Each structure stands twice: as C-alpha cells, then as structure tokens.
Image: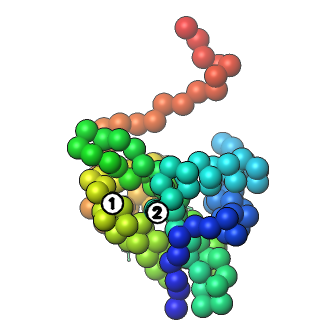
Amino acid sequence: MIKIVPFEEKYLDENAKLFAESYSDKDGQWGMEQSKKRVWENVNSFPECCLVALDENNNFIGGILCQKYVNYDGPSLYIDSVHVVKGLRQQGIGKTLIKEAFKKAQDLGVKSVFMYVDSTNEFPGNWYSRMNFAKTKWVAYAAKVEGLKF
Ligand SMILES: CC(C)(COP(=O)(O)OP(=O)(O)OC[C@H]1O[C@@H](n2cnc3c(N)ncnc32)[C@H](O)[C@@H]1OP(=O)(O)O)[C@@H](O)C(=O)NCCC(=O)NCCS
C-alpha cells in the first residue's frame, strides 16, 4: 500500500536524484546541485502540492513537483514534474500523485492545470489527453543567452 505525503527536506536527495535521472537526456544532463535547486524552487512556490510517494516501509518511490501561477481566471497549478522510480512504474503511482496534487490544488482554489510534455514521445502526452488535458496552441521557445541575436 503506498502513502502520499507532503514533501519534507528528508526526501530532498532521493527526489533530486530521481528528478535528475528522469529528466536528463541528450539535450541536457541534470547534476545533483541543480536538481536540488529545482526541487526547492517548486517547494517554495507551492509546498501544498509538492508530494512524495512512499512504500509500506516508508521508502521514497516517487514525487510530484508543482508551482503556482497567476492565470486570468485565478490561480493555476503548474506541474513541473512527476517521477516514479523505474522498477515501480505502471502500477498507478504516477496517477495517484497527480490525483492527490489536483485534489489539494482544488481545495486551495486552483482553477486550471498545465504542464509541458516531450512532444517527440507518445507517452505521457497521450496519458494526459486521456485525463482530459488538451494540447494548447502555445509552444515553448528556448535559447542559450549567449546565442541570442538582436
Ligand atoms: C510518467 C510517470 C511519472 C508515470 O508514472 P507511473 O506510476 O508509471 O504511471 P501510472 O502507473 O499511474 O500510469 C498512468 C497511465 O499511464 C499509462 N502508462 C504508464 N507508463 C506508460 C508507458 N511507458 N507507456 C504508455 N503508457 C504508460 C498507464 O497505463 C496509465 O494509463 P491509464 O491512466 O489510462 O490507466 C513515470 O513513467 C516516470 O517517472 N517517467 C519519467 C519522468 C517523466 O517522463 N515524467 C512525465 C513528464 S512531467
């Protein structure tokens, strides 16, 4: 039986490590220090919706990191990341983390939810679509500061 609990500092290292493993790819590698800063950035923005999944022995098995944004219709929940340890994926842990974060966000008056997905992979975009998320017209533009031309 898994438990979903609020993020606490004692989960920082494992959370940051899993974040780094989950989001490093050919475009960029996350180191532990940057990864920890990213965890704190989220926790400082929306602590109530940064949650951790634990197994029956209280071992860390996943987490969700969220931020709060101002939107035209009220506060909006931004899901920065959902990550589950590799050997325990596809057992409903990711879904439980998302459901719990939504529930807390709704209780706190949040009106909308958004996140980015890797559009070159079918999953997890297709999963979010099944939950009734819709692809928006907005796409991310990014650049290295030193590469900008004016
Ligand atoms: C995305 C992630 C958090 C999902 O966690 P999970 O615990 O495996 O997800 P669940 O078991 O709750 O499954 C959720 C749904 O996705 C489907 N699914 C899970 N993994 C899948 C995969 N690799 N391919 C296709 N479908 C998959 C499940 O069948 C389920 O579908 P349903 O809701 O229609 O029943 C996990 O794969 C992960 O940590 N990935 C690395 C980080 C990442 O990419 N995060 C998402 C970007 S923010």
Residue 122 shows in the view: no
In depth, the one of 129 and 69 nearer the eye is 69
Q: Position of residue 81 (x, y in %)?
A: 53, 57
> Can you say which quadrant of the picture contains the C terminus?
top right
User: Amino acid under label 2?
Assistant: Glu
Q: Position of residue 18 (x, y in %)?
A: 67, 64
Element on which disc 1 rests: loop
Element on which disc 2 rests: helix
Q: Residue at x 43, y 76 (%)?
A: 96
In depth, the one of 44 and 76 nearer the eye is 44
Would residue 117 appear left or right of 43 to someone viewing this image? left
Q: Where is residue 23 in the image (x, y as percent from the top left)?
A: 63, 54
Q: Residue at x 62, y 52 (%)?
A: 40
Of mark 2 and mark 1, the one earlier in the sequence is: 2
Would residue 35 appear left or right of 77 to someone viewing this image? right
Q: How is the image coloured?
A: rainbow
Residue 16 shows in the view: yes
Assess disc 1: are there few (<14), some (14-19) or many (≥20) residues with their C-alpha within 10 Å of its C-alpha.
few
Q: In which quarter of the image is residue 139?
A: top left
- Disc 2 + disc 1, Cβ < 8 Å: yes
User: Amino acid under label 1?
Assistant: Leu
Q: Which residue, as the protein is rendered here, is positioned at the far top? A: 150
In depth, the one of 115 and 54 nearer the eye is 54
Residue 132 vs 68, above or below: the answer is below
Spatial CA span between label 2 and label 1: 9 Å
Q: Which mark is residue 48?
A: 2
Q: Which residue is drawn at 65% across and 90% down?
A: 57
* Disc 1: which residue: 108
In depth, the one of 8 and 62 nearer the eye is 8
Q: Which residue is drawn at 69% across and 52% down?
A: 35
